Image: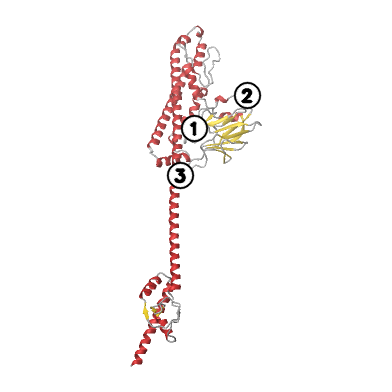
Amino acid sequence: MGEPGSLVTGDRAGGRSWCLRRVGMDAEWLLLEDGNEVTIGRGFGVTYQLVSKICPLMISRNHCVLKQNVEGQWTIMDNKSLNGVWLNRQRLEPLNVYSIHKGDHIQLGVPLENKENAEYEYEVTEEEWDRMYPCLAPKNDQMTGKNKGLRTKRKFSLDELEGPGAEGPSNLKSKISKVSCESGQPVKSHGKGEVASQPSEYLDLKLTSLEPSEKATEVHVYPGSTKVIELHHKKQKASNPSASHSSLALFRVTMSRILKLKTQMQEKQVAVLNVKKQTQKGNSKKIVKMEQELQDLQSQLCAEQAQQQARVEQLEKTFQEEEQHLQDLEKEQGEEDLKQQLAQALQEEEKEKVQAQKEEVLSHVNDVLENELQCIICSEYFIEAVTLNCAHSFCSYCISEWMKRKVECPICRKDIKSQTHSLVLDNCINKMVDNLSSEVKERRIVLIRERKEYHRIRYITIEASLH
């Protein structure tokens, strides 16, 4: 992310300070300054701007806040981030303040697919300033403020540069330096005849807040976090994917333009620095022209980055809307499933009712058979039923055996004068027995066979006695 030149102070030399050390890296450490609140996110108005080079939406615009409490203890708070803040592998509740201590592990976002660790993991530590300084990340330069300052910056004309107060080369260089310094680190003249030649890292500070955008232009910008991938796949299923593809294409084109503008700015700054080292009164117009071109490039770069930020936010909003749409669809599908389950339950209940009614009818039929269609002599269902002159019915075999002893009705004791076969009773009983258990059917078949055999033997006996 560049050299942390804006953080150098002579007072800290030799002291110790708290910082978030990037795990596995000797760069991009985050300084925790006593008495100052530290904000982290991908937006412009934060202390440290983090833009993931493989998943731009992994870090929220204002992801988390670190500050000291009244006792001087450093604390961390998840500022309602999308992918969360993790302290010692435990996810923090949003807007709740948690104390951090030396050696604690802080994770921003979640690991991507097939990755064990997240992209941004830090360890809370206290280091010597001389050890820490080379590894520190630069603070966000507030590009929107810089852009506003560029539009209000006074432009010096050639007459002003060559006026009475600009006789010496030192004064000329001083004015040129004032025009070129935009980042809060003015390039100062150090004496008469001395060219303003600050180290190149100070000049590069103008672009430090844009470094994440450069990283975000790599080919692997769009694999996304687990959640973003899931949303993107769901979006393709739930709606027309052409809108998402066009947004992603615009995102790639804009990031390429930002990278190109940044490269042009760096080349222009190097050229301006070289001209300043060789400056004379005769080429002051060239310097002013180059400074103006540099300002135009900076303005274009700021505008492109603002547009890109707006597109990223729009893409994130689109993903959130699609996720909500999918949740609504899942809810509707759940309601449909519930209705189907309810209809199925009602059908099963109706089947159970029908089965119960059927069993009740069969039970009633069985009662009728037992009470009304049974012979009182053999206690079986009528077999070849006959009805006497008194209207009582019996089995043909049973009443024949009864009449060998008495010629009167077994029920009413009236004399038996006539017998009539009842085909209606036989047919009704046979049809009813067909719906009864197999045991009842088999017993009836055996009885019928035995009685037929008895009648056959009796008939043979009578025939033999007659002859």
The residue lying furthest to the left in this view is: 467
Please, what is the three-letter code of the amino acid marked with disc 1? Val
User: Which residue is at a point 61% across and 23% down the rendered structure image?
Assistant: 10
Count up the numbered dots: 3
Colour scheme employed for the rendering of this structure: secondary structure
State which tag comes first along the sequence, 3 or 2. Answer: 2
Query: Depth check: 385 or 420 in front?
Result: 420
Q: Which residue is mark 3?
A: 331
The quadrant holding residue 344 is bottom left
Query: Depth check: 17 or 90 in front?
Result: 90
Q: Which residue is mark 1?
A: 51
- Label 3 CA crowd tier, 10 Å (few <14, some 14–19, many 20+): few
State which tag comes first along the sequence, 1 or 3. Answer: 1
Residue 405 lies, with reference to residue 185, above or below; the image says: below
Point out which mark residue 173 bears.
none
Horizontal arrangement in the rendering, residue 16 relative to residue 329 (left or right): right
The residue lying furthest to the bottom in this view is: 467
The quadrant holding residue 407 is bottom left
- Label 1 CA crowd tier, 10 Å (few <14, some 14–19, many 20+): many
State which tag comes first along the sequence, 1 or 2. Answer: 2
**Closer to the eye: label 1 or 2:** 1
Point out which mark residue 11 bears.
2
Please, what is the three-letter code of the amino acid marked with disc 3? Lys
Mark 1 → mark 3, Cα distance in angstroms: 35 Å
Please, what is the three-letter code of the amino acid marked with disc 2? Asp
**Closer to the eye: label 3 or 2:** 3
The quadrant holding residue 307 is top left
- Label 2 CA crowd tier, 10 Å (few <14, some 14–19, many 20+): few
Q: Are marks 1 and 3 in contact (CB under 8 Å)?
A: no
Rendered location of residue 320, percent (x, y): 46, 37
Which element is circle 3 on?
helix
User: Which residue is at a point 48% across and 21% down the rendered structure image?
Assistant: 148
